[in-house]
Amino acid sequence: MSSINLVSETKAPAPTPALLREADHRISNHLALLMAMVRAQMKGIDQGPEIVSRKEARELLEATAGKLVSVSRLHHRLSEQSHLESIYLSEFVVNLCTSLVSSLSLSERVYFVHHWRADCRLSPEQAQYVGLLINEIMINALKHAHPTGLPVQLEIRCERHADGRVTIVIGDDGVGLPEEDIGAGGVGLKLIRTLAKSLDAELRVESDSLGLTLILTLPPHMDAVKCLSVVAG
């Protein structure tokens, strides 16, 4: 597992009324996005079988709980330092992955490996979409990567291109997807594509017998602040 030199932020003063209004606005937007995603899950259920198994019900609840954890971690980060207009990608992703595993009791089912060639800042809104993407990819991997029930390894890599684009690569070590499912996929993959589109990002899906990999390339304007070098072990 890589080691990351995370950048510490300066402690912020008490939030002003303007900052509190902005926080309320963000919370409202984030809850609206969560509701839209839950509605998409509900639509998928409506199109499925009449009877849902206990395993399928648990998977649905895990997916919803993961969304809540993702947004909760973002708000926790912002509440600690409400003056922040941008968030370090590495710190946010590492903390989010740790929280997902802990909050959903997944320590025996999934583990993350992180590799960073560069560290960039995202706005809170952009971090929201990236966090929800990671959750959807994790839930998808738990459902499909290892039919035999083996623990899933999810590797997250990040690199910055010379033109300012940022690429995030998330891959599992499972059996991959059937070729006919790559273009369409189920509710989870459709949600992933929708979130990528909301980020104005390019999403590429690659699959073989060694696992499923999703490659998300964020446009140059995502990197509003100069990227910082990090040490990967």
Image (cartoon, grey):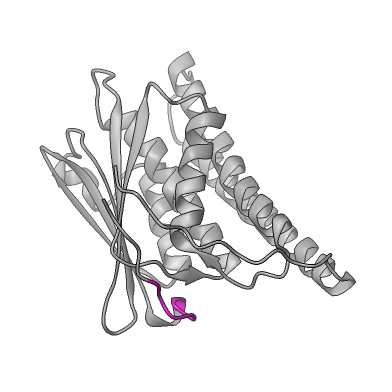
Q: Is residue 225 magenta?
A: yes
Q: Quadrant of residue 160?
A: bottom left
**Does residue 171 appear left or right of residue 102 in this picture?**
left
Q: Residue furthest top?
A: 54
Asked whether 132 or 91 is in front, the reply is 91
Asked whether 207 or 56 is in front, the reply is 207
Asked whether 44 or 193 is in front, the reply is 193
Q: Residue at x 48, y 18 (%)?
A: 51
199 versus 3 height, above or below: below
Residue 110: percent from left, percent from top: 36, 30
Q: Which residues fall within the magenta stretch? A: 222-228
5 versus 188 height, above or below: below
Q: Quadrant of the N terminus?
A: top left
Residue 207: percent from left, percent from top: 16, 46
What is the tally of numbered marks visible in this picture?
0
Q: Residue furthest right?
A: 17
Asked whether 47 or 52 is in front, the reply is 52
Residue 117: percent from left, percent from top: 28, 64
Q: Quadrant of residue 128?
A: bottom right
93 versus 118 height, above or below: above
**Does residue 81 appear left or right of residue 201 in this picture?**
right
Residue 181: percent from left, percent from top: 23, 44
Q: Residue at x 51, y 46 (%)?
A: 95
Helix, strand or loop for the magenta stretch, by majority:
loop
**Does residue 229 appear left or right of residue 211 in this picture?**
right
Q: Residue furthest left?
A: 209
Q: Residue at x 29, y 30 (%)?
A: 152
Q: Is residue 29 magenta?
A: no
